[in-house]
Image: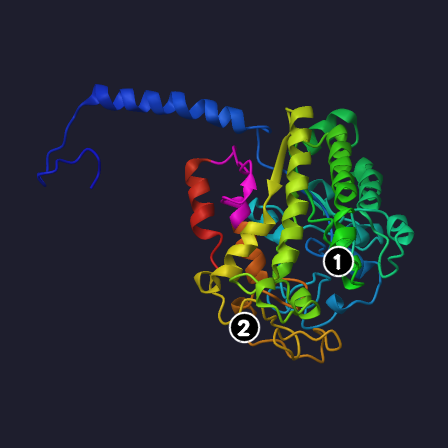
């Protein structure tokens, strides 16, 4: 029933014009300051620049010509129908973000550098993320005796690439201020591999915990540099609930039931991820105080993903959310000697699985995480889209995230 209709079901309605004008004026007075306060940039995002690891890499490692499993079928089978260098069966979170804002999927920096995209419109965005990348430089791991880091594409190197490409993105300080000020910067997820590599070597959690401050500092230093260059809006993701990762569940399988939570995830690994995320958020709060005119957004990958490990059926996932789609053997369908490849047949319907290959998630899982970020409540503060009308926002929310 509409608020002005009579409760007795009659066809007449109350015509208290003055009262409705009063309500409208109050609504405007309350609403306009909120919109103004949340608006850091006065228009829609014109481009996206992405940094990170395999959760965001749209093909950089692929075009660096390094042979890794993500370069071959069945990777990319769901959406692209061929491998693209993305370590999933389809799109990643950054792909959904780009589509949501009506921007093209991000081209990998390496492909542009190699001259394969001479007509690439870099003003619309570039992806600098590389699968296997770390926040810290490789020298850190060498000093710690961690020799299994397969790439040397740290966050520092990705920032150097961005600086190298900056003259192609904008030609003057004023144009850079305009372009970068209306761009969305996605800084991460990065840092997960800084922990993954030592965990694979069975370094103690106590030792790896001491790495956290340095990883967080590397991330915040990158944010500071981007702000100095002109970035205004930055999304900074935290770590996923790694205790629910198929690879970790297999590698650290325990006979003690107390090691697992109600969803079957390893408690101690999730606590570690929570610690990293807490320290990152503390550092981001400090950056917000130092740069009050920027919009630094924490993206809560952890809780956005944890919900479908705890209640998979609510999100369309069937069976165990802890088993991967493309794997072979074991209680979690993961075997390090038979990783997802052309020789391993994936599940019939990846959309019913959270995990793709034991390390990375499926397009369906990434879609849910992206929706949780873009439509809430898994960002702090919320990502705003001030340039859209209420009708346009409604259309985006009601139609975009339909699997």
- Tell me, yes or no, whether the highlighted magenta stretch contains residue 66: no
Residue stretch rendered in magenta on the structure? 372-388
Q: Is residue 124 above or below residue 56?
A: above
Asked whether the residues under the numbered discs 2 and 1 touch, taking CB atoms below 8 Å apart as contact, a structural biologist would say no
> Could you say whether the residue bearing mark 1 is in a helix, strand or loop?
helix
Upstream in the sequence, badge 2 or badge 1?
1
Residue to which mark 2 is pinned? 349
Give the label, 2 or 1, closer to the camera: 1
Q: Is residue 315 above or below residue 96?
A: below
Label 1, residues with CA under 10 Å away: few <14, some 14-19, many ≥20? some
Query: In front: 309, or 5?
Result: 309
Q: Position of residue 9 (x, y in %)?
A: 10, 41
Residue to which mark 1 is pinned? 196
Q: Tell me if I can see residue 104 in this picture.
A: no
Label 2, residues with CA under 10 Å away: few <14, some 14-19, many ≥20? few
Residue under the point 78% across and 33% down: 225
Q: Position of residue 224 (x, y in %)?
A: 75, 32
Query: In front: 160, or 223?
Result: 223
Q: Tell me if I can see residue 290 in this picture.
A: yes
Please tell me whether the stretch drawn in magenta is mainly helix, strand or loop.
Answer: loop
Q: CA distance from mark 2 to mark 1?
A: 28 Å
> Could you say whether the residue bearing mark 2 is in a helix, strand or loop?
loop
Residue under the point 16% across and 36% down: 5
Q: Position of residue 78 (x, y in %)?
A: 60, 67
Point out the image quarter for the N terminus: top left
Q: Position of residue 121 (x, y in %)?
A: 72, 44
Residue 193 occupies quadrant: bottom right
In screen coordinates, is 122 left or right of 77?
right
Query: In front: 14, or 266?
Result: 266
Mark identifier at residue 226: none
């Amino acid at each position: 029933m509409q608020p002005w209709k009579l409760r007795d079901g009659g066809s007449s309605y109350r015509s208290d014009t003055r009262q409705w004008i009063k309500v409208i004026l109050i609504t405007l007075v309350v609403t306009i300051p909120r919109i103004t306060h949340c608006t850091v940039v006065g228009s829609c995002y014109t481009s996206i620049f992405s940094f990170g690891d395999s959760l965001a890499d749209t093909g950089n490692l692929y075009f660096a010509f390094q042979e890794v499993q993500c370069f071959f079928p069945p990777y990319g089978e769901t959406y692209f129908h061929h491998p693209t260098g993305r370590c999933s069966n389809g799109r990643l979170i950054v792909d959904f973000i780009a589509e949501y804002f009506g921007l093209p999927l991000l081209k990998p920096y390496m492909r542009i550098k190699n001259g394969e995209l001479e007509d690439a419109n870099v003003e619309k965005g570039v992806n600098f993320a590389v699968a296997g990348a770390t926040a810290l430089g490789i020298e850190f791991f060498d000093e710690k005796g961690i020799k299994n880091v397969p790439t040397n594409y740290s966050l520092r190197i990705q920032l150097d690439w961005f600086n190298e490409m900056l003259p192609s993105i904008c030609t003057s300080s004023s144009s850079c201020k305009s372009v970068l000020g209306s761009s969305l910067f996605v800084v991460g997820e990065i840092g997960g591999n800084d922990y993954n590599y030592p965990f694979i070597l069975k370094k103690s959690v106590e030792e790896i915990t001491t790495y956290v401050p340095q990883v967080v500092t590397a991330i915040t230093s990158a944010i500071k540099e981007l702000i100095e260059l002109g970035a205004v809006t930055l999304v900074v993701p935290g770590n996923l609930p790694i205790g629910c990762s198929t690879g970790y569940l297999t590698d650290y399988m325990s006979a003690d039931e107390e090691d697992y939570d109600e969803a079957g995830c390893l408690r101690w690994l999730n606590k570690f991820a929570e610690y990293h995320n807490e320290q990152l958020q503390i550092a981001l709060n400090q950056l917000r105080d130092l740069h009050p005119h920027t919009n630094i957004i924490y993206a809560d990958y952890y809780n956005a993903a944890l919900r479908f490990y705890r209640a998979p059926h609510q999100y369309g996932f069937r069976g165990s959310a802890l088993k991967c789609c493309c794997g072979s053997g074991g209680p979690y369908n993961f075997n390090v000697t038979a990783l997802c490849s052309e020789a391993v047949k994936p599940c019939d319907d990846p959309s019913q699985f959270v995990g793709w290959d034991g390390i990375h998630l499926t397009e369906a899982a990434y879609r849910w995480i992206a929706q949780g970020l873009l439509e809430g409540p898994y960002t702090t503060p919320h990502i705003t889209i001030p340039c859209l009308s209420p009708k346009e926002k409604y259309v985006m929310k009601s139609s975009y995230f339909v699997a």
